[in-house]
Image: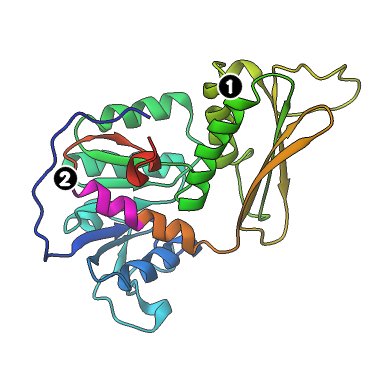
Amino acid sequence: MTESTSTPTSNSASAPRRVAIAGASGRMGHMLIEAVRNAPDLRLAGALDIAGSPALGADAGAFLGFDSGVSIVSDLRAGLKDAQVLIDFTRPEGTLAHLAVCRELGVQAVIGTTGFSDAQKAEIAEIAKDIAIMMAPNMSVGVNVTFKLLEMAAKAMATGYDIEIIEAHHRHKVDAPSGTALKMGEVIADALGRDLKDCAVYAREGITGERDPSTIGFSAIRGGDIVGDHTVLFAGTGERIEITHKSSSRVTYAQGSLRAVRFLAGQRAGLFDMYDVLGLR
């Protein structure tokens, strides 16, 4: 992801950053609201949900039994007017609508939404010329360290090893492969000097012939309440190496998001990822 060349903004060390949450009544929204509530340097300043949601008008902290003073709204300008940064784990179309208003109001954004098309990613990059955006398919610190390990492994095992990516998620996930699995593929392909579009194999059935050693295979499992498991298999002759990350709770995504919120405090504009946030570049 392209880094910004912009200069940092000045921030008050004492004033909490004002955060808005998109999808406030969902599972991830609840996790984020609770995380912001427990962070002394952050304050909930807005809560968004889709029109028609039964949660509209309710206090965003009601599920925790406390009064946050922030009502869940569908009006984007009303929900973002007091915020400095939006955290968004929704759907591509919704995220783009949110970003348009963020751009208008000068609100930064932390995006964990997955499933964007190339055209939508290009649109986000254009918006990032005016506001600071941190976008990553997975906010987990551990997953992003795993990306770095995969880059090292791919370079060391560039020949003689077949590469397969296996991911598993809960039954409610709507996109496949997961954004994290695709990012793993991109990291590996880049390390090998390949384009993932040219070497990815997403399905096998029937008489497929021998495996092309230049390909990167993907397999997706959906079932139960699996939060997120990802394994990359480097299969050679006489040995195989497996690099695995397993999530047991969404809390790791929430905590990574808060680190991103803090990182953006020093940025005027630009498109960043978790490598920037964690200093892994």
Q: Locate residue 196, reporting x and y percent.
A: 58, 21
**On-image quarter of the C terminus:** top left
Q: Which kind of residue does numbered mark 2 sit on?
A: Leu
User: Which secondary structure is most common in the magenta stretch?
Assistant: helix
Residue at 64% from the left image edge and 21% from the top image edge: 158
Circle 1 packing at 10 Å, graded few (<14), some (14-19), many (20+), is some
Q: Residue furthest bottom?
A: 65
Between marks 1 and 2 in the image, the one whose residue lies nearer the viewer:
1
Residue at 48% from the left image edge and 64% from the top image edge: 251
Q: Which residue is mark 2?
A: 105
Q: Secondary structure at mark 2?
A: helix
Residue 265 on the magenta segment: yes
Rendering quarter of residue 74 = bottom left
**Depth order, front residue of 237/233:** 237
> In the image, 276: left or right of 269?
right
Rendering quarter of residue 268 = top left
On screen, 234 above or below 47?
A: above
Q: Which residue is mark 1?
A: 196
Q: Which residues are magenta?
A: 258-266
Rendering quarter of residue 104 = top left
Q: Secondary structure at mark 1?
A: helix
Q: Locate residue 119, reporting x and y percent.
A: 42, 24
